[in-house]
Image: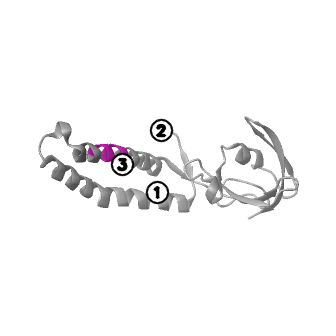
Amino acid sequence: MAEDVHITPEGLEAVRKEHEELTRVWRPQIAAKIKAARELGDLSENFEYHAAKNEQGMKEARINELEVIIKNHVLIDEHRVPGQVAMGSTVRFREEAEDEETYRIVGPTEADPKSGRVSYESALGKAMLGHKVGDEVEVSTPSGTYRVRIVGID
């Protein structure tokens, strides 16, 4: 039995859109590529055929991944305790003399720190859950610990 996949409404929409693109547009294209490569003759030395089959395998795996997310999704509840960090919160914080940083706490499926989204399962996400503005939070990572102060929650 697959585990629940916690995801924001916009994350689920992005997953559905990617799934739609892969199944309705990509699948017919790759089928045509494979057919054209087969027509070139001997498959044992046919680079185009092997490249298309490899691409097909990777994309089909992604389609399966997306289907699991769609089937087992649990929307992150936007109705949370006011002023408290929860899944779906956007948190502004500062580490000692560093500049202020902002991250949204999301499910692991949508996590992308470069885009300002961290998983609630990450060290930073776990440490912040349940805290309020003004709280100093200790973040434990494999390379050590550090402290951040929460300066805002949206």
Side of 38 relative to 9 (left or right): left
Q: Earlier in the sequence, mark 1 or mark 3?
A: 1
Q: Give the numbered dot on residue 59.
A: 3
Amino acid type assigned to the residue bearing label 1 in the image? Val
Q: Is residue 3 above or below residue 103?
A: above
Mark number for residue 15?
A: 1
Res 36 label? none
Disc 2 is placed on an element classified as loop
Quarter of the image for the C terminus: give it.
bottom right
Ranked by sequence position, the earlier of labels 3 and 2 is 2
The span shown in magenta is 53-58
- The answer to whether the residues at label 1 and label 3 have Cβ atoms under 8 Å apart is no
Q: Secondary structure at mark 3?
A: helix
Residue 55: x %, y % from top left: 33, 47
- Which sits earlier in the primary sequence, circle 2 or circle 1? 2
Q: Position of residue 144 (x, y in %)?
A: 79, 36
Where disc 1 sits, the SS reads helix
Q: In the rendering, at what x and y percent does residue 25 appear?
A: 30, 61
Seen in the image, is 47 located left or right of residue 40? right
Within 10 Å of the Cα at label 3, are there few (<14), some (14-19), or many (20+) other Cα atoms?
some
Dots 3 and 2: beta carbons under 8 Å? no
Three-letter amino acid code of the residue under disc 3: Lys
